Image: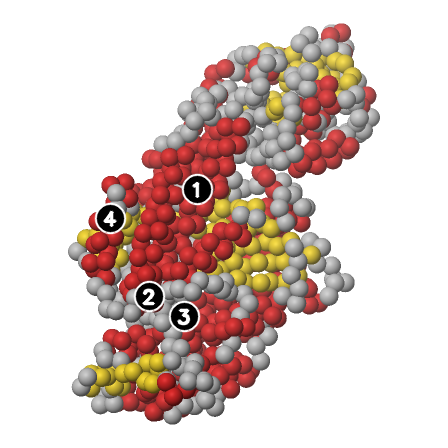
Amino acid sequence: MRKAMPAALQQPISLIGRELINDLSALPENEDIITDFLLERLQRGQIYTWVGSLLLTLNPNNEISTSHLYNSSEFNKYTNISDIYEANPHIFTVAAKAHYNLTKQFGKSCQVIIISGETGTGKTYNAFKCLQFLGAVNKNSVQPSQDICTYNTMIKITDACRLISAFTTACTEKNEVSSRHGQLVRLHYKGGSTHSLVVYSYADKDVREKLLENIFQMIFGLANAQLETFYLSKDDCYDILSVVDYTKGTYYQEGFRDTLQALDISGFEPDQQNQIFHVLALLIHMGNIKFVKNGETCAIDLSSNKSKEALKNTCTLSSLTEDTMIELLTTILINPQSTWRKHTSYHRHLVTVDACRNRLHSIIRHIYDLLFRWILNHINDTLSLQQEYSQWLGILDIFGFESFDKNGIEQLCVNYANEKMQQYFIESYVENSHKDLQEEGFITNCNSLNTINLYKKRLNIIEENLFLTLNDACQTPVGINMSSIIQLTCKNLNNVQKKFLSEKEGNFIIEHYSGPVAYSIEDLLSKNADKVPNEISLIFNISRNKFLRSLINSEEEQQFTVKTTTKKKTMLAKLKYNMDTLIKELSKCDLHYVRCVRPNRSINNKWDRKDFKKQLACIGVFDALPLVKCKYPIRLRYRDFYLRYSKKNTGYKTTSRYVTNDCQMQNIHKTSEIATHTKFILDRESKKSNNSEEEDEVFLTNSLLKNKEVHHSYFATKSKKDVKDVNSIENSFETRSESKNNDTKMKQGVLKKHLGDITLHISSTNTRYADNDDEKIWSIYYDAERNFYTIRINSCTLFYKNGILSRRCLAAIPIRMHTRITCLTNSHIVPRSALPQGLQDCL
Ligand SMILES: Nc1ncnc2c1ncn2[C@@H]1O[C@H](COP(=O)(O)OP(=O)(O)OP(=O)(O)O)[C@@H](O)[C@H]1O
């Protein structure tokens, strides 16, 4: 059960100024209010919102222009950000915070920005914005005297990521440029600037039947003459490009120009670029090969011109004979590695067209995979400058949750990866927050533990029941009826487990965190087996194409992909291994979460609120919110707090002052003494000089703080009705000006006004009085719209609202300060004894 919120924090939102709120934790825990609020923000072009320390981003869906969010002034604003913990919600803030923590050595030496959400919600877009921003920061931090190579590193890195993206995106039902791969871009830092890049590939989707962006680009981007050298033509029809939108030629041409530029910048020589296109052309032709049944066996369909032509071009581009290619595609070489028993090797014919087709596509996929990894290795070799440093900043962009009308193993891989990441988020963020809050005494019990258990159970069933069954089935040499295996697996589950995994009409249904998804079992085994023919390297080793040969033999040399040690190399086993490795890596890092959602329109063109709420629930916003509401939106580690305010201390005079109940001022010399007089809040607002004698001083005491037993002291917000008569304050200031020569009390420079149970004291020693009676030294202005007072004292401006007197324009959400007597080094809680003089900056 959570502790009741302080009354001041439960006031109606309208009083706080809804349009100023940028953190969901300031709103009541009501899904409808949150939905309205976010959609309102979206209409205003505010696509970013804090959920405590999480950043929530809304995909503007091409309806709202967001260019203003990423223009050069925004870059400058965030690259020169001074107050990293209180900055507006923006992807740049998250990047700046991670960069700040890394370079100032706050927290761990590895900082990772995790961007997640369903497909098409804007993960890749935001990951690029992060990179661009870090590029701008890097540019600022690199001294002109530094190596030009270092100076250009970030430009190269951004282009390299663009290149990787071109090789890993494809058009899907929900996103034209959907990532088909999960990558962790690691920017290695030395001396505050990026020195190298390493891109780790953690999970690839099954790209067999997918259309890869770069292949489109190539077809549209290459000149006709160059296409002819690869036996391609813009007018011909290629199966691998069967759903290409030919009206988008210009778009792909532009993409190709970017890819070429990225290839140049990433250090690919023209002949290497040509080799890449050569291999892509080979794959396009291979995709056109068709098979027919030929008696008991199968053969390549030579009666179709398209298929015949494809075979011819495939052989020419791979420099292999037609016989070799036919043998590779229609037979299996048994015992291929045998050298001493060579006579025992023999070819077994494939007997079904499907088997031949699966074999062809696994070869296409394998070669494409090898090409991509070769490119990745090349980029990493060029940009890692042969060195990795212990400090790095990572951006993790992993493909988003998918649920289409028909889902296969590809969606299973994607959704499992998302399930795993979500479980990790719930475990690392929600569970840790829960522990913190419990330790700090804010909550005694919390429902979030049930949520965590739910995630664990579901993942356990996917991994232990489903994956193991599918992997075992792949290893079995005899034919298997997958439908009955799935039925049996589901039948053996207990009632709780059945909630997560069930079987219906030949499909199996997983109740994911994002809702149920039905997966077809068609092709499940063949695709999961991911059987790359063992003889592929033997056959391509006799090719006269040197690049192809080296590519096929390069598998063992690849460094930046996670290698599975498991003997059962099924697709699901590899994926599980990769995800486990990734999570192990993440557990060593400080994590910054960015959660992406995409509001969609329903048929009547209104926002689909149901879907929007579902997305918010799925990415964990509603799980995190109750915890976030208990925590403070701004949480500084003790060390950060100390560094920040101790600096402020040295800038000020050494003597602090506090006000006792009867407004006497005393000097104190140790900050620790402040702790015993917690009424001290605001000091020295005038900036005239360091000479304390000439300065005005403003104090605010709050009777709420008188009680020393109050452990969680907070600077309470109070509703407007609690503030009594504002005019009377103004009047008293006027009176003070007028009676300056007569009133001895005024000469002592103390003004006191009771506002409910808050007392505002304004004191002045040696105050500079007005030279003439018309000059107003004090003024109070009430801003009715935003419900706060602006107090001007000489050149100094203060803001007052609901009991908070602050030097800055007031924060949009209620602010509390939590203190305790002692604290751990890494605690977010400031010990009372360490409250320094610059505490007012917290406000
Ligand atoms: N902040 C934004 N401003 C403008 N456009 C955006 C923004 N975020 C997303 N988009 C648009 O949404 C499209 C889809 O985004 P993106 O490709 O980043 O989605 P994704 O979450 O990475 O999807 P997938 O998981 O399928 O890769 C982008 O092409 C872009 O046009």
Secondary element type, mark 2: helix
Q: Secondary structure at mark 3?
A: helix
Q: CA distance from mark 1 to mark 3?
A: 34 Å
Query: What residue is shown at x 63% (from left), y 31% (from top)?
Result: 824
Nearest to N terminus: mark 1 or mark 2: 1
Is residue 635 shown to the viewer in this render?
A: yes
Amino acid carrying label 2: it is Gln
Q: Position of residue 363 (x, y in %)?
A: 37, 77
Residue that label 3 marks: 213
Q: Are marks 1 and 4 in contact (CB under 8 Å)?
A: no
Q: CA distance from mark 3 to mark 4?
A: 43 Å
Q: Residues within 10 Å of mark 1 (few under 14, many from 20)?
A: many
Q: Residues within 10 Å of mark 2 (few under 14, many from 20)?
A: few
Q: Which residue is mark 1?
A: 426
Residue 401 seen in the current view:
no
In the rendered structure, which amino acid carries the disc numbered 3? Glu
> Could you tell me the amino acid type at mark 4?
Asn
Seen at 40% across and 42% down, the residue is 620
Give the residue at mark 2: 475
Relative depth, front residue between 333 and 454: 333
For ligand 1, tell me if the residue under mark 2 lies within 8 Å. no
